[in-house]
Image (tube, rainbow, N blue to C red):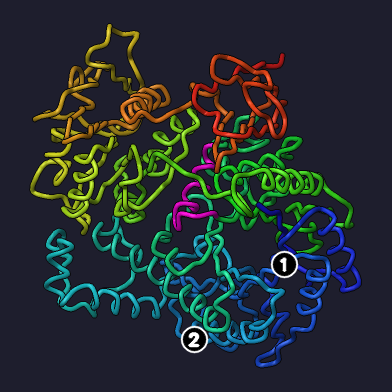
């Protein structure tokens, strides 16, 4: 549970470095990340490496009791390298070359760039192989940022054909798997397959899915080149990569197998704008459920504590609007991440730079070196987290989060749906979060895992969108339910096979027996259509619960109908959700994407069936999280709130407050000893 910072000593006169590092130590910083985009400084001309400046920075960091984390500098190949080997550059789908002048302009499949990558990583790893002051490495930076996951150059075309050769015996097998008789899209040979090019209509969905798989595999293979090299020189180093908010282009579960530590970059006020949210409180502090969803995704990859490798330190340069964060927000984010399993929160960056593209990106200190707002928040958080860690149940640090509920997440489903959303506002992540938010609103911890994971440890499993489904996965889920698991499915489940094709059987295909129903019809609904359902045993119109975007009506075979459509028209009276008893467990299939009230009803019933302790539904923006016997209460709103334990008590005897108390100021937090979630409630005191 540490605080760190990203530092670029090469941006500043060397006589400033010692004072910078002293101030880092004064703030309680433990880790300093460096060398992220420094290739041209490390190697100003081919074969002439200069490590003197970085050695000096590493020594200063060690002298002040901190640890260095270095980065491979491959995210920004220097201009001299581009001039020598222009074939390393990416190409857009229309053939346009992505030139040097910013970053991330290289192709993952370029043999030339892989050769240059091996050369520079070997040089760095060899130089620091026996240096105990360097404790770990970050590979590259944010693979795929700025839309650079996909490349359409000739190297990628060759690599894609090789990838298909390994997957399919010949063109006949490929044609059969994809279904290319439609629109005369058959191939005579795999060598005839190209990377996607501009076409009048959408790409063939099976072809598009395989290209997405290939793209992910290409990035994973490129990253593995770096992780293998670093491990070769020192297997005591940890190796990580900094992922991004809801990033869809990489199968992070597969890539995680090559990492010792998972990290991601957290920019709360920018991420809410990417999600289309812009309320006052969200622009000041972000959305806690969007933040924690990312924390839980990245913690779940390896099932152990993660890092926030870049934490927003103040205003930032890249979202549409850059409101100043609320007072205390940078402290709040560090605690919130720690509650969800972060062992380090590394602020980006140390100091606002004087040049180039990120001048409008704040640091912990201003461009003149004086402390900015984030510095004081980071300093406060560092001291508080150290005290919490000392009082925790672990010997050295708090253990990772123990979650009773799993949400199933599969990147191949994202890729398959992305080619045929069938509704302009259908969003895979929004569907998952419609089931995630009501869990977090009750203080329930959640792992977000791959569908093939071992599910035995979870009391309940939510599968919002298993669009692609194999018989083996259906058996896996059936075994979980029969052994007593509580299983909740969302819409668009069991629609297609692994090649992104419909089956000659009704949805949900191999899950039909488990669900006890099949899907008769589906529709996507625009916002202006009335879209409501109600409990089958409800009392009337007051029971109406809105849904959005996607709806299926079901034909129960063995299952009991539990929701029916109440909106007028063709759907009226049709079954929208069913419940089926399977062995010692229960399976619910909900055929709609729930809005808040319906999501709350579905999750509330799931928690009751699974007998999972939980809080009363907390107000939007107020969340409670337990990690290793410590409970965090975080207020992401501009309102004052009062926290009440079981029975409505707020006195010190009811809850042992380790930090703060039952009264939380706007954008404030409190920490309590023990798990106080069961029966917890919060009251809001709104300002004028």
Spot occupied by residue 245 in the image (x, y as percentages of width and height):
53, 50
Q: Nearer the viewer, residue 196 or 272?
A: 272
Spot occupied by residue 497 in the image (x, y as percentages of width and height):
18, 54
Note whether residue 142 is visible. Answer: yes
Q: Is residue 299 above or below residue 213?
A: above
Horizontal side, residue 676 vs residue 529: left or right? right
The residue carrying mark 1 is: 67
Where on the picture, by quarter, is residue 159?
Answer: bottom left
| Magenta stretch, residue numbers | 289-305
Horizontal side, residue 10 vs residue 567: left or right? right
Q: Nearer the viewer, residue 400 or 43?
A: 400
Where on the picture, by quarter, is residue 250?
Answer: bottom left
Q: CA distance from mark 2 to mark 1?
A: 34 Å
Q: Is residue 620 above or below residue 42?
A: above
Q: Is residue 13 above or below residue 517?
A: below
Horizontal side, residue 519 vs residue 222: left or right? left
Q: In the picture, which quadrant includes the C terminus? A: top right
Spot occupied by residue 676 in the image (x, y as percentages of width and height):
55, 29
Q: Earlier in the sequence, mark 2 or mark 1?
A: 1
Asked if labels 1 and 2 touch by Cβ distance under 8 angstroms, the answer is no
Answer few, some or many: residues within 10 Å of disc 2's Cα (few below 14, many 20 plus, some between 14 and 19). some
* Residue at 39% over, 39% down: 405
* Residue at 64% over, 79% down: 78
Horizontal side, residue 47 vs residue 497: left or right? right
As drawn, the residue found furthest toward the bottom would be 47
* Residue at 67% over, 82% down: 128
Q: Look at the numbered disc 1 and give the secondary structure of its residue.
A: strand
Q: Nearer the viewer, residue 463 or 144?
A: 463
Q: Is residue 359 above or below residue 684?
A: below
Note whether residue 314 is visible. Answer: no
The residue carrying mark 2 is: 112
């Amino acid at each position: 549970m540490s605080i760190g910072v990203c530092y670029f000593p090469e941006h500043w006169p060397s006589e400033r470095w010692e004072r910078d590092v002293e101030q880092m130590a004064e703030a309680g910083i433990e880790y300093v990340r460096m060398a992220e985009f420094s290739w041209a400084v490390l190697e100003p001309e081919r074969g002439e490496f200069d490590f003197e400046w970085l050695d000096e920075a590493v020594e200063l960091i060690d002298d002040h009791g901190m640890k260095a984390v270095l980065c491979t500098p491959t995210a920004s190949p220097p201009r001299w390298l581009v001039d020598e080997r222009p074939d390393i550059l990416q190409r857009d789908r229309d053939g346009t070359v992505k030139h040097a002048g910013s970053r991330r302009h290289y192709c993952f499949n370029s043999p030339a760039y892989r050769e240059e990558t091996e050369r520079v990583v070997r040089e760095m790893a060899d130089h620091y192989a026996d240096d105990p002051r360097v404790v770990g490495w970050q590979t590259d930076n944010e693979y795929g940022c700025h839309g650079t996951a996909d490349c359409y150059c000739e190297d990628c075309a060759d690599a894609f054909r090789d990838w298909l050769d390994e997957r399919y015996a010949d063109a006949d097998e490929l044609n059969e798997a994809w279904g290319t008789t439609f629109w005369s899209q058959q191939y005579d040979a795999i060598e005839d397959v190209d990377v996607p090019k501009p076409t009048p209509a959408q790409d063939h969905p099976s072809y598009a899915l395989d290209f997405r798989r290939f793209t992910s595999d290409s990035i994973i293979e490129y990253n593995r080149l770096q992780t293998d090299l670093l491990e070769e020189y020192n297997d005591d180093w940890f190796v990580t990569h900094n992922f991004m908010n809801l990033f869809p282009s990489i199968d992070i579960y597969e890539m995680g197998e090559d990492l010792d530590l998972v990290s991601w970059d957290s920019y709360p006020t920018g991420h809410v704008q990417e999600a289309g949210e812009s309320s006052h409180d969200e622009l000041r502090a972000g959305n806690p459920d969007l933040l924690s969803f990312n924390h839980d995704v990245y913690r779940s990859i390896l099932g152990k504590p993660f890092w926030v490798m870049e934490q927003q330190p103040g205003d930032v340069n890249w979202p549409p609007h850059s409101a100043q964060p609320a007072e205390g927000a940078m402290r709040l984010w560090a605690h919130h991440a720690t509650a969800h399993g972060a062992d380090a929160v590394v602020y980006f960056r140390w100091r606002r730079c004087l040049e180039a593209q990120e001048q409008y990106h704040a640091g912990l200190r201003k461009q003149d070196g004086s402390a900015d707002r984030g510095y004081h928040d980071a300093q406060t958080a560092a001291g508080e987290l150290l005290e919490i860690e000392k009082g925790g149940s672990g010997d050295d640090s708090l253990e990772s989060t123990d979650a009773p509920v799993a949400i199933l997440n599969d990147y191949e489903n994202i890729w398959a749906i992305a080619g045929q959303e069938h509704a302009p506002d259908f969003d895979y992540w929004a569907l998952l979060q419609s089931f995630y938010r009501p869990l977090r609103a009750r203080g329930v911890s959640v792992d977000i895992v791959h569908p093939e994971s071992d599910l035995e440890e979870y009391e309940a499993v939510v599968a919002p969108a298993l669009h692609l489904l194999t018989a083996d996965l259906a058996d896996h889920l059936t075994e979980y339910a029969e052994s007593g698991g509580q299983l909740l499915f969302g819409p668009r489940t069991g629609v297609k096979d692994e090649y992104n094709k419909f089956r000659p059987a009704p949805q949900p295909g191999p899950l039909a027996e488990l669900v006890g129903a099949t899907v008769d019809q589906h529709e996507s609904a625009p916002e202006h259509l009335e879209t409501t359902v109600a409990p089958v045993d409800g009392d009337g119109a007051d029971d109406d619960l809105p849904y959005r975007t996607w709806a299926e009506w079901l034909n129960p075979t063995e299952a009991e109908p539990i929701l029916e459509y109440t909106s007028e028209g063709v759907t009226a009276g049709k079954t929208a959700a069913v419940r089926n008893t399977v062995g010692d467990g229960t399976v619910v299939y909900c055929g709609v994407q729930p809005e808040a009230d319906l999501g709350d009803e579905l999750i509330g019933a799931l928690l009751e069936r699974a007998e999972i302790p939980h809080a009363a539904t907390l107000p939007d923006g107020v969340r409670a999280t337990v990690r290793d016997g410590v409970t965090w209460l975080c207020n992401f709103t501009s309102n004052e709130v009062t926290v009440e334990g079981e029975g409505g008590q707020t006195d010190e005897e009811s809850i042992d407050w380790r930090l703060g108390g039952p009264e939380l100021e706007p954008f404030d937090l409190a920490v309590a000893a023990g798990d106080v979630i069961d029966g917890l409630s919060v009251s809001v005191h709104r300002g004028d």
